[in-house]
């Protein structure tokens, strides 16, 4: 038989102290790659400490977009986990609450400031 199914969910948030630049829009640019690595550096450990931690297999930034203000950058990521019998079921609300708590109410991600109302988890 095959192994557990890999499931995905999207994670979106807005960074308020990272000015959006056109090179962030280009997935092959050095700026995109370095910023994606920073996002993974901060996001992956949080999800590893969440209830889906044991099944979590990583996040990949799918895009950066301009935010409402000049210093805002919106981040879109797709995260993966193995849907296994040991995981009751993916609870989007619970993962959102855990991420919100671990980012100080949705306001901090490492040295980045987040728009408190921008955190979104969809499953």
Image (cartoon, rainbow, N blue to C red):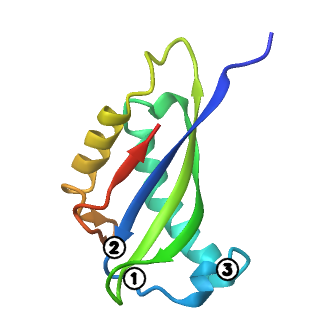
Q: Residue at x 22, y 47 (%)?
A: 101
Nearer the observer, 100 or 70? 70
Do the numbered discs 2 and 1 sit on residues whose CB atoms are within 8 Å?
Answer: yes
Q: Which quadrant would residue 74 be assigned to in this image? A: bottom left
Q: Could you tell me how many numbered marks the image carries?
A: 3
Tag in front: 2 or 3: 3
Mark 2 = which residue?
A: 112
Sequence-first tag of 2 and 1? 1
Mark 3 = which residue?
A: 26
Mark 1 = which residue?
A: 18
Q: Which quadrant would residue 29 be assigned to in this image? A: bottom right
Q: Which quadrant would residue 95 be assigned to in this image? A: top left
Q: Is residue 57 above or below residue 102?
A: above
Nearer the observer, 1 or 117? 117
Query: Relative to 61, is 4 on the left or the right?
Result: right
Instruction: From the top left corner, tell me how far across and down residue 90 is, in percent.
Output: 44, 27
Q: Is residue 44 above or below residue 32?
A: above
Nearer the observer, 73 or 1? 73
Tag in front: 1 or 3: 3
CA–CA distance in space, label 1 to label 3: 16 Å
Q: Residue at x 31, y 35 (%)?
A: 93
> Regarding mark 1 in the picture, which secondary structure is present there?
loop
How dense is the environment of label 1, judged by Cα within 10 Å: few (below 14), some, or many (20 and up)? some
> Regarding mark 3 in the picture, which secondary structure is present there?
loop
Q: Is residue 112 above or below residue 62?
A: below
Sequence-first tag of 1 and 3? 1
Instruction: From the top left corner, tell me how far across and down residue 4 is, in percent.
Output: 67, 20
- Please state, as top left, top right, bottom left or bottom right, where the N terminus lies in the image: top right
Sequence-first tag of 2 and 3? 3
Q: Residue at x 54, y 74 (%)?
A: 35
Query: Relative to 32, is 76 on the left or the right?
Result: left
> Regarding mark 2 in the picture, which secondary structure is present there?
strand
């Amino acid at each position: 038989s095959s192994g557990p199914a890999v499931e995905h969910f999207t994670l979106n948030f807005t960074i308020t102290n990272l000015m959006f630049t056109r090179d962030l829009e280009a997935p092959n640019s050095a700026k995109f790659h370095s910023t994606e690595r920073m996002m993974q550096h901060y996001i992956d450990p949080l999800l590893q400490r969440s209830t889906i931690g044991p099944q979590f297999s990583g996040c990949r930034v799918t895009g950066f977009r301009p935010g409402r203000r000049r210093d805002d950058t919106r981040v879109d990521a797709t995260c993966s986990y193995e849907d296994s019998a040991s995981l009751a079921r993916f609870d989007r609300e619970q993962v959102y609450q855990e991420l919100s708590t671990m980012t100080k109410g949705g306001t901090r991600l490492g040295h980045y400031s987040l728009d408190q109302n921008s955190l979104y988890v969809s499953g």
